[in-house]
Amino acid sequence: MQTLRNKLLFGLAPTLLIVLGLGLFSIVMFYRLGNNIDVILRENYRSVLAAEGMKEAIERMDSGLLFAMIGEPETGRAQYDANRPRFLEQLGVELDNITLPGEGDLAADLGRLFAEYEARAVVFFAAPADPPAARRRTYFERMLPVFNAVRQRADQVLKINHDNMTEMNNHARRSASLSIRLMIGVLAAAVSLTVAAAVLLSRSISRPIEAVTEGARALARGELDQIVASGSRDELGTLATAFNEMARTLRDYRQAGAARLLRAQRTAQAAIDSFPDPVVVVDSTGSVTQVNPAARRILAVSAAHDAPFSWRPAEPLQTLVEQVLAGKGDYLPVGLEQVVSFIDHGQERFFLPRVVAIRDEPDGLLGAAVALVDVTKLHLADRLKSDMVSTVSHELKTPLTSVQMAVHLLLEEVVGPLEPKQVELLLAARHEADRILSMINDLLDLARIEQGKVALDSQPTPPRALVDEAIARASTRAQDKGVTLQGEVEPGLPMVLVDRERIEHVFDNLITNAIQHSPRGGSIRVGASADGRMGRFSVEDDGEGIPSADLPFVFDRFHRVPSSRHDEGAGLGLAIVREIVVAHGGSVEVSSSPGRGARFRFTIPTASPEPDALPTRGGLS
C-alpha cells in the first residue's frame, strides 16, 4: 500500500542520495588534498630551513675568515670552527630530503663546493699573517669565489623548494575552486529535485489536510453534517474516514445529548420551582441562569429563555453575591439580626439570605445559588418577645423602684428602730432588689439597642486611651481579687470611631467577667492591634475557660455558662456587648478551651475607613 511514509521516503530519497554522495566526495577529496599539501609543504619547508641554515652558517664562517684577515686570527678561527658543524648538519638534512627534480644535483654541488671551501680555508689559516696583503689576496682570489658559489647553490635549493610550495598552493586553490563549483552544481540539482518533490508532496498532502481542517472548523461552528472526500488509501485517507465517522458520532451524540440536556434542565427547573421561598441561580459572571416563581414575584427577576442575562439585586444581596463569586466562602447566617425585608403582595416579609457557591471541583467556580428563607413568623415572634420583655421590664421598673425606696427608708430607720434580724432581712431584700433592677435596666438597654433607638455619639478616640482607662476603672476590683491587669497596645495605631460611653460598657463587662473567672494570682491581658481597616481589641484571661458546647451561645440572651464560681448575672451582659459592637459596625468573637482561659476579641472601624469598607449595622439589618 502506498502509505504517506512511503511517499515521503520516495520523494526525499534522490535528494538524500545526492547529498550523501556529495558529502562522501567532499570528504575524500579534501582528505587527499590535505594530506598531499601537508606532506609536500612539510618536505619543502624542511629544505627551505636547511638552505637558510647553510647560508647563515657559511656566512658566519666567511666572517671568521675576515676576522683572520684583519689581524684577529684566533677570533676568526673560533667563529669558523663553531659554524662548520652547523653547515654540515643542515647539508645532511638537505641530502636526506631530496624531493624535487634537480634538487639532488644541487645538494651534491653544495657538498663538493663546501669540501673545496674547507680545503682552501685550511691553506688560508696556514698562510703567514705577515705580510697582510698576501692573506687578503688569498681570500679574494681563492676563498670568495667558492663562498659565492656555495651561497648560489643554497639560494637555488631555496628557490626550487619555494617555487614548489607556491605551485602546490596554486594547485590547492584550483582544486578547491573546482570542488566548490562541482558542489554548487550538485547542490543546485539537489535543491531543484527537492523543490519539485516538495511541491508534489505538498499538493498530495495539503489538499486532504485542508479539507479535514475546514470540516473541523465547520464542526466547531456546530455544523455537524460534514463529509470529507477520501481519495487515497494512505494515512490521509484513513484520517478522512475517521473524521467522517467522528462527525457522524457527534451528530448522534448531539441528538441524544440535546434530549438529555432538555430533560435535565426541566428537572432542575421543576426542582427550583417547587421551593416556596425565592431561589436564584447565577453563573460566575453574576448573570441569572435559573429562577423560581417566588423569586420572580418577590425579587422582580426573570431569566432569559436562550441565554443568561445580568441581574443586579438590591443591597445587601448584591454585596453577598459578589463576595461568594470572588471566592470568599459561602454566606450561611443563622441569626435573625441578619434578615432582609421585601414587599410581597403589599406586605413586608422578612427573609434570611443564604448564598452558596456552585463548584464542579474544589477550585472550579461555576456560579452561586441565592436562597431566601422566609423567617417572617420567627422575626415577628422575636420582635414580639423583645417588645414584651421591654414592656414588662418597663412596667416592673416603677413598682420595683418604689420597693427599693421603701427598703432604703426602713434601713435608715426613718419609721423607727429595727431589730438585727429585721436589718438582715432588709439588707438581703435591698441586694435582691438592686440585682433585679440592674437586670431590668439591662433588658431595657438591650431592647433599645436592638430596636435602633440608641443614637451613638461616635468620636475618633485613640485605642491606647480606651485600654488604659478600662484598666484604671477595673484596677480596684482586680486588686481585691488578687488578679493582675496588663495592657498590650501596639504602637502607632490609628484612631477608632466609638461612642465613648457605650464602648466603656463593653470593656467593663468583658474585664469584669475575666476577673470573676480568673483564679487568685492570675493575669488578664487587655490588648489593641490593627486589623486592616479595623481596630482589634481583646480581653484574655487564664481562668477556667468556657466549654466548647457553650461557645456558640455565649452571646445569646439569658445564656449562662456553668461555672464553679458563684455568678449572679442574668446572661445579658455579653448579649449587650455584641449589640453595642455591632451597632458600631464591628464584630465580636470568643475562643476558649476548658482550663486554659478565654479570649474575647472585637473590632471597631478606624476613624477614616475607605468608602467601600464602611460596615453596615448587624451585617444585614
Image: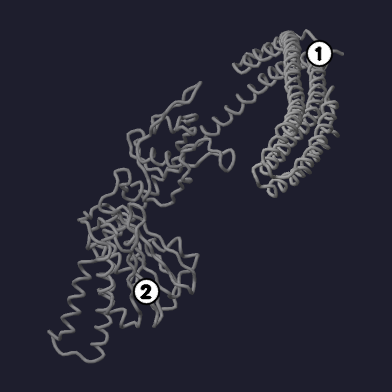
Quarter of the N terminus within the rendering: top right
Q: Nearer the viewer, residue 223 or 37?
A: 37
- Check the image and report above or below for 469 versus 387: below
Say what secondary structure mark 1 lies in.
helix
Say if 153 sits above or below 247 in the image.
below
In the picture as drawn, the residue positioned furthest to the bottom comes out as 420
Q: Residue 148: x, y in percent?
A: 72, 29
The label number, if any, that marks residue 524 in the structure image: 2
Q: Circles 1 and 2: CB distance less than 8 Å?
A: no
Question: In the picture provided, is 598 more to the left or to the right than 474?
Answer: right
Dot 2 falls on a residue whose secondary structure is: strand
Residue 196 x/y as whole percent: 73, 8
Give the x, y percent position of residue 8: 79, 16
Compute the Cα span from label 1 to label 2: 94 Å
* Residue 12 found in image quarter: top right
Judge from the rendering whether residue 435 lies leftward or rightward of residue 192; answer left or right.
left
Location of residue 296 (image quadrant): top left
Q: Residues within 10 Å of mark 2 (few under 14, many from 20)?
A: many
Question: Is residue 580 something one can see in this rendering?
Answer: yes
Q: Is residue 572 left or right of residue 399?
A: right
Q: Which label number is shown at residue 14? A: 1
Residue type pointed to by label 2: Ile
Closest to the observer: 599 or 80?
80
Q: Amino acid at mark 1?
A: Pro
Q: Residue furthest left?
A: 414
